[in-house]
């Protein structure tokens, strides 16, 4: 299993019993006849045979280990070497590994794992995401750059004409076509840019013309820009508008998602020889209580949309915040969130779990523990700077299955830093595998480069 140290195996021949040598009575040796010489010769021959096979076995073992065993270990990325993924790590190990990490283009998976990845922040502020996406493109199935917003533009003339707000799909200026071309040359990852639905739900969901216009804008953009589909984010915004608490409005919201999915599925990709259709991945937030609330996305919603939606990106991160400092995404919370979403029926859960992308954060948080609290997200470069400056003691929190450390800044304010490690990532990958689900990374440009070697 990923995340556990490989157990040392005992050699197959270590339990063999030792040959017993029975000594003859010395007095009998003086009285033996000529037949004793024959017995002595046979014993001597047996000893020579035993020595020969013992020596030849040792030589064979030595040749195998030098020619094959070491070569097998060397072919693995460094993070897969025995004993590297562990809970007991030091700040120096992290810094050293970051400086000397060796890149490998090989894929090392213990099972099939679908990956959804968000390579960049809005307006391309994080260029490292683009670079790492190209370097490790063969390890991902979906790449989702954060490029688009669907907005309502309210015009007085349109309001008078009762046509409602004008819809625009904003974000093409963010698109990097050269990056997309490079990705497709290096791997088979599909590009599904994210579209945030910022249009007013009271107008969009209630008016048929508005719904059709929104869908037409999205489908047309996918066809013109040769995308593989989109990742749609709207549920959290609809919850903020109170849409999901109203049964009638909630039903309209679900119907819109279904209509969009059907429209995307009706379009074949011309460059694909396998008659692929445009895809729809939908972003859903985690519930923050033990029971689903009216605005939460649950099992019935999952069933309702399962035919129209190709995947659901479950945001299992941001568990803690500045007002409640703590781990980013406790493993037990991730497990209970997936269980709550899929329901108590294990058979039904397994049949839908393959459409879930379990959220996995590659960023961390630096929280202030005094002076009115505060703090917020940090990325890999911030984390490495803190390690170099403070040389902290890295601690493993068993409850959350995350590493963290405590430090005091130049104003003597204490901070708690939670940031992913190879061990925490490996355990979450294994959790996703146990459900038969994929993962959704937010986002690899914010992590350490060698995190991708675990994928």
Image (cartoon, helix red, strand yellow):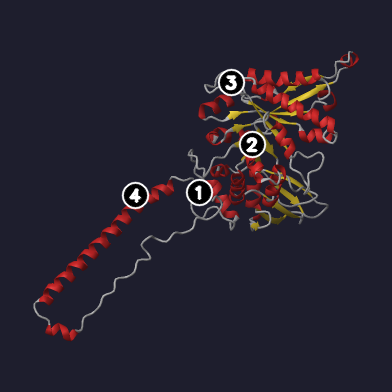
Q: Nearer the viewer, residue 292 or 442?
A: 292
Classify mark 2: residues with Cα within 10 Å, few (<14), some (14-19) or many (20+).
many
Q: Quadrant of residue 362?
A: top right
Q: Which residue is mark 2?
A: 355
Provide the residue designation for mark 1. 80
Front tag of 2 and 4: 2
In primary-sequence order, the first of circles 3 and 2 is: 3
The residue carrying pointer 4 sits among few (fewer than 14), some (14 to 19) or many (20 or more) residues within 10 Å by Cα, namely few
Q: Which residue is mark 4?
A: 67
Identity of the residue furthest to the left in this view: 34
**Image location (x, y in percent) of residue 304:** 72, 33
Q: CA distance from mark 2 to mark 4?
A: 43 Å
Q: Residue at x 65, y 38 (%)?
A: 352
Circle 4: element type: helix
Task: Assign a secondary structure to mark 1.
Answer: helix
113 w.r.t. 207: above or below = below
Q: Which residue is mark 3?
A: 269
| Precedes in sequence: disc 2 or disc 4 | 4
x and y, in percent, of residue 320 in the image: 75, 48
Gap in Å between the C-alphas at discs 4 and 1?
20 Å
Task: Residue 191: give x, y in percent of width and height.
Answer: 61, 28
Pointer 2 with pointer 4, Cβ within 8 A: no
Residue 173 lies, with reference to residue 418, above or below; the image says above
Q: Earlier in the sequence, mark 4 or mark 1?
A: 4
Local SS, label 2: loop
The residue lying at 36 percent from left, 62 percent from top is 13
């Amino acid at each position: 299993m990923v995340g556990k140290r490989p157990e040392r195996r005992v050699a197959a021949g270590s339990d063999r019993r030792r040959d017993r040598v029975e000594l003859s009575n010395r007095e009998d040796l003086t009285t033996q006849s000529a037949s004793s010489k024959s017995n002595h010769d046979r014993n001597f021959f047996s000893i020579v045979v035993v020595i020969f096979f013992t020596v030849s076995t040792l030589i064979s073992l030595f040749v195998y280990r030098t020619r094959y065993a070491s070569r097998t270990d060397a072919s693995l990325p460094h993070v897969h070497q025995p004993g590297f993924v562990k809970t007991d790590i030091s700040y120096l190990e992290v810094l050293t590994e970051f400086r000397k990490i060796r890149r490998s283009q090989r894929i090392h998976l213990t099972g099939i794992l679908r990956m959804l990845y968000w390579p960049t922040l809005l307006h391309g502020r994080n260029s490292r995401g683009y670079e790492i996406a190209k370097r490790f493109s063969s390890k991902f199935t979906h790449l989702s750059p954060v490029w688009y917003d669907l907005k309502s533009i309210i015009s007085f003339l349109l309001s008078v004409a009762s046509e409602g707000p004008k819809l625009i799909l904003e974000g093409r200026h963010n698109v990097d076509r050269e990056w997309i071309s490079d990705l497709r040359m290096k791997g088979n990852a599909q590009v599904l840019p994210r579209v945030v639905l910022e249009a007013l739900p009271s107008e969009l969901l209630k008016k048929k013309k508005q719904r059709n216009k929104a869908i037409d804008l999205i489908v047309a953009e996918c066809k013109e820009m040769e995308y593989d589909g989109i990742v749609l984010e709207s549920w959290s915004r609809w919850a903020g508008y109170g849409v999901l608490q109203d049964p009638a409005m909630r039903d309209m919201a679900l119907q819109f998602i279904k209509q969009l999915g059907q429209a995307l599925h009706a379009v074949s990709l011309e460059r694909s020889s396998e008659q692929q259709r445009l895809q729809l991945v939908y972003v859903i937030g985690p519930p923050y209580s033990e029971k689903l609330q009216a605005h939460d996305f649950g099992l019935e919603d999952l069933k309702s949309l399962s035919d129209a939606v190709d995947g659901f990106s479950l945001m299992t991160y941001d568990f803690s915040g500045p007002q409640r400092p703590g781990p980013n995404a406790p493993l037990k919370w991730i497990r209970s969130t997936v269980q709550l979403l899929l329901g108590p029926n294990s058979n039904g859960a397994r049949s839908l779990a393959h459409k879930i992308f379990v959220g996995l954060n590659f960023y961390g948080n630096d929280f202030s523990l005094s002076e009115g609290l505060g703090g917020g997200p940090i990325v890999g470069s911030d984390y490495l700077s803190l390690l170099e400056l403070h040389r902290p003691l890295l601690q493993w929190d068993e409850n959350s299955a995350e590493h963290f450390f405590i430090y005091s800044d130049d104003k003597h304010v204490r901070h708690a830093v939670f940031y992913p490690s190879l061990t925490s990532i490996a355990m979450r990958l294994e959790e996703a595998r146990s459900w038969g689900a994929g993962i959704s990374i937010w986002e690899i440009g914010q992590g350490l480069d060698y995190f991708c070697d675990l994928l």
